[in-house]
Image (tube, rainbow, N blue to C red):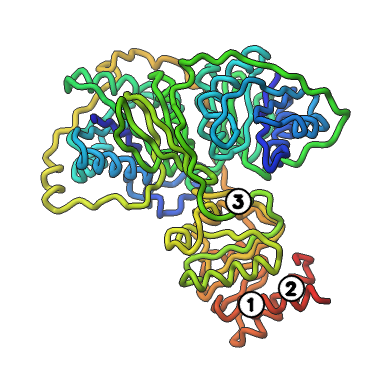
Amino acid sequence: MKYLVYVELKNGKPSGAALELLSAAKKAGADAAAVLAESGCEDAAAETAKFASEVIILDDVITDPNGRPTEDFLTAALAKLAADEGADGVLLSAAPFNRNIAPRIASRMGVGCVTDVIGLTVEGGTVVFTRPSYGGTVLEKQSAADNKVVATIRSGSFDAPEEGAACEPVHKSVAVDDADLKAKITEFIAEAGEVVNLEDADVIVAGGRGMGSEEGFKLVEDLANELGAVVGASRPAIESGWVGRTHQVGQSGKIVAPKLYIACGISGAMQHVSGMMDSGYIVAINKDEDAPIFQIADVGIVGDVHKILPLMIDAVKAHKAQ
Amino acid sequence: MEFLVCVKQVPDDSVEIHLNPETSTPDLSQADPEAGAFDTYAEELAVRFIEENEGSVTVVSVGTEDNKTCIKNSIAVGASSGYVVADEGTDCLDSAQVADLLAAAAAKIEEQEGKKFDIILCGKESTDAIGGQVGPLLAEKLNLPLVENAVEITSVDGGISVKQETDTGFMMYEIATPAVVTISKPDYDPRYPTIRSKMAARKAKIPTLSLSDLGITDLASEAKISSLGFEEPKKRQAGIKINETEAEEAVKKAMDQMIADKAL
């Protein structure tokens, strides 16, 4: 059995979530061929080659204004490459772009698709995928006929792969027809603000409705700065316009698993919790003693974030000075 | 523009769903059925579009007779007709099979209403299974242009301009119609029905399309994805809860604990 593993880049390097797919393929008992398809991906391919026994660099890529492959192109290219390579499936990280194309690749390969996988086991030769449903309160187990599948896998679900003898990346090209390229991209409008990398953050400080205002939310940013953390937010804080939507953690935002997650003024609705419950250590600050966030917090502080956070910022400063 | 909006009836997503310990299946008894959130955004986007331009909105839902309630709600907020595709006797369809049924239903409705759909909309994902597959699979099945996670559609020469929400901003597309578009959350909320529109919708006839109406004697393919059962996620243990009258004391205790646990 052989799966293609699509490796997207993050800041010029193979994304951590994509490298974890190599561990997932191994656990499924499949040989893996890593595929890179972004312009200037030679260095990332060489890095990937330390962990994979086969690395393919896709040439003649049709790119969007950001230099990444278009959805239409990558859909067609990965389906065709899978056929050329005799692959039984394709694994992708569960980034939104990949979630968009995964079902389409599956359709063209004539196989099933499983999205948002968080674990897998092999039972009597069948690869059994676990994925969340109902906002994460229930997990469903699914299998694909003959283990032929296109799956998207959430970041942090598998360990990083072990380094082995590096292979030599090979260049390949597939013919993509005009008929495969139906959606014409006219423009990319970047969202104001910095690039937010919640998925790879070691520490996240997140704020919710309890921060009260845009000004109140600044306390979250201040604590994040002090800790070298990335700022996260729950849906109410985003919808109130206190912080950009790229900061959203939860079912409709990013699924994260940092070493430390500090939830400020977040009640702990399932929508949010399902996006951060795999964090290593959770600290919660909320004035409502019965807030569900306390049920999953390692340290819960019942209190007013506006009083607690300034003191915590000072305490972190003092701790760092020691 | 003629819109077809595909709506999935799901349990109310504000109710936490857990497993029924007897059956080990999701217990939906406390959650009223309703249209999926992203499907209602799709409906609203379509209705706003035809209010500004022209055209009509038809809704279709795969499920049981029970789905007619949810379709009547769609009619009360601006759809002009709605259909149920009866999936009785089709045990546990996978996303590709649902897409096959919707594709067949679109053709049948076009034939019955004597029109052609320009834009087929789906919510980007349902709030129960959260697969996010039916829209893209429908586009593949019908071999139509597709843009996913859209928040805006405008009319341009020869087709539509679609604004797609991405990780870092918005990608603008131009595509020919007919096309399939999946909808994310735009920066507005769906409208509520009025008493009058609700009363009118109650009288609407919602035709049921059976598999034989759609010319499907046997579902085209065996399901490629099988459900093997459900389980509850591992519960996380709560740690310590600090409840002090003085904020200084609370922060000190919390910091001591975090340092002791090497969390800092």
Q: Is residue B169 above or below residue A319?
A: above
Using the rendered image of the protein, determine whether residue B125 is visible from the camera's viewpoint: no
Residue A280 picture location, percent across and down: 70, 57
Is residue B88 toward the left or the right of residue A236 in the image? left
Which residue bears the numbered disc 1? B242
Q: Quadrant of residue B10?
A: top left
Circles 1 and 2 in contact, beta carbons < 8 Å: yes
Quarter of the figure with residue A20: top right
Specify the subunit that label 3 lies on.
Answer: A
Q: Which residue is mark 2?
A: B257
Q: CA distance from mark 3 to mark 2?
A: 32 Å
Mark 3, secondary structure of its residue: loop
Quarter of the figure with residue A226? bottom right
Height in image: A78 above or below B128?
Answer: above
**Where is residue B261 drawn, in percent x and y?**
77, 67
* Residue at screen point 71% across, 41% down: A16
